[in-house]
Image (cartoon, rainbow, N blue to C red):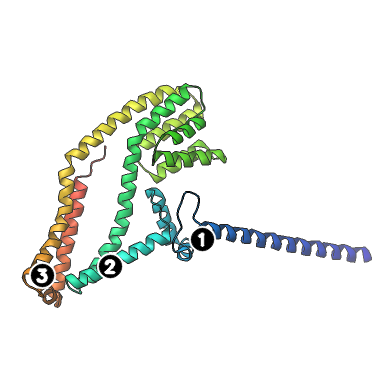
Amino acid sequence: MNALVLLTLGATLLAGLLVVLGAHAYAAGRAQRAALVERLTASGEPPPGGRRRRFPTLDRRLRTTSFGRRIEQKLATTGLDLTPGEFLVYVLAAVAGVWLLSAAFLAPFFGPVAGLIGIWAGNAFLNWQRARRTERFINQLPELARILANATQAGLALRTAIGIAAEELEAPAGEELSRVADRLAIGHSIEEALGEIAERLPSRELVVLVSTLVLSARAGGAIVGSLRNLTVTLEQRKETRREIRTQLSQVTVTAYLVPAIGLASLLLVDAMMPGALDRMTGAFIGQTAVLVSLGLFALGFVLIRRLSKIDV
């Protein structure tokens, strides 16, 4: 009986000791994580080669929400040196500015409308910046394929060739390949590391290049010949895209002129008859007419952009 009591007491003490050690390890891990986050986001010193981050408290809180994580993902694809907190503050400041200017120069009714347009413009700016960065990356793909082909022909492994290409190429290809090289260095597979680029900068050319590299890494084969042929194909597609963009430049300008004509018309009416916009938007019929007109201008912009968008 005494042996059973001692055994029970010993097991209880051991369980209590393990609970205390586990709680201590958990608390130490949380403290280390909090210290790391504090150094990365709220440090008073700028990172090496970087700049001092603004609004660290807002940025830290914003990253914990799904909305902040979506903004962070979009910013990661644009290459902008901004945090989610900084971007949100700048967008809100711009929205407030266009709200006040529209209400002062046009009519109070146009303030909220301009604010909504400003919010849409912030998201459109991220999409445009992402498309612009993707286009620049696509233009660098022929040179990337050429560097990889030369490196593999010289007997270097694909991982080493990617590191060399990251050093040789400028942004954005150099930055993206540096991320790939870092992930390969910590144990990620080539398929995972290259797949992240295809998700951030989606394009048909990049998907073909990634598929070629992944298949060659899996099954082997004549990767040099495949990359040589792919280089020629990418050069031809690059020239084709450039010709199409030149042919459609007039249509693109027309798409932006459509809403500009509407804004110029409002300014012209207000200049010719001061107070006309106030009287027009003071009635429900006038407000409805203005909203319908803005909707038609937006519809025209979208339709022209869709008609001028050609996938090659």
Q: Secondary structure at mark 3?
A: helix
User: Label 3: how many residues lie within 10 Å, few (<14), some (14-19) or many (20+)?
Assistant: some
Count of all numbered marks drawn on residues in the image: 3
- In the image, what residue occupies the spot 74% across and 61% down? 21
- Residue 168 appears at what percent x and percent y? 43, 33
Instruction: Identify the mark nearer the N-term, 2 or 1.
Output: 1
- Residue 137 appears at what percent x and percent y? 35, 39
Disc 2 versus disc 1: distance between alpha carbons? 29 Å
Instruction: Identify the mark nearer the N-term, 1 or 3.
Output: 1
In the image, is residue 110 above or below residue 161? below
Q: Which mark is residue 44?
A: 1
Residue where numbered disc 3 is placed: 270
User: Label 2: how many residues lie within 10 Å, few (<14), some (14-19) or many (20+)?
Assistant: some
Q: Secondary structure at mark 1?
A: loop
Residue type for callout 1: Gly
Instruction: Identify the mark nearer the N-term, 3 or 2.
Output: 2
Q: Quadrant of residue 82?
A: bottom left
Disc 1 vs disc 3: which is toward the camera? 1
Residue type for callout 3: Asp
Residue where numbered disc 2 is placed: 97
Where does the C terminus fall, quadrant-wise? top left
Q: Quadrant of residue 112?
A: bottom left
Residue type for callout 2: Gly
Disc 1 versus disc 3: distance between alpha carbons? 49 Å
In the image, is residue 97 above or below residue 69? below
- Answer with left or right where residue 239 lies relative to residue 195: left
Q: Which mark is residue 294?
A: none
- In the image, what residue occupies the spot 49% across and 34% down? 163
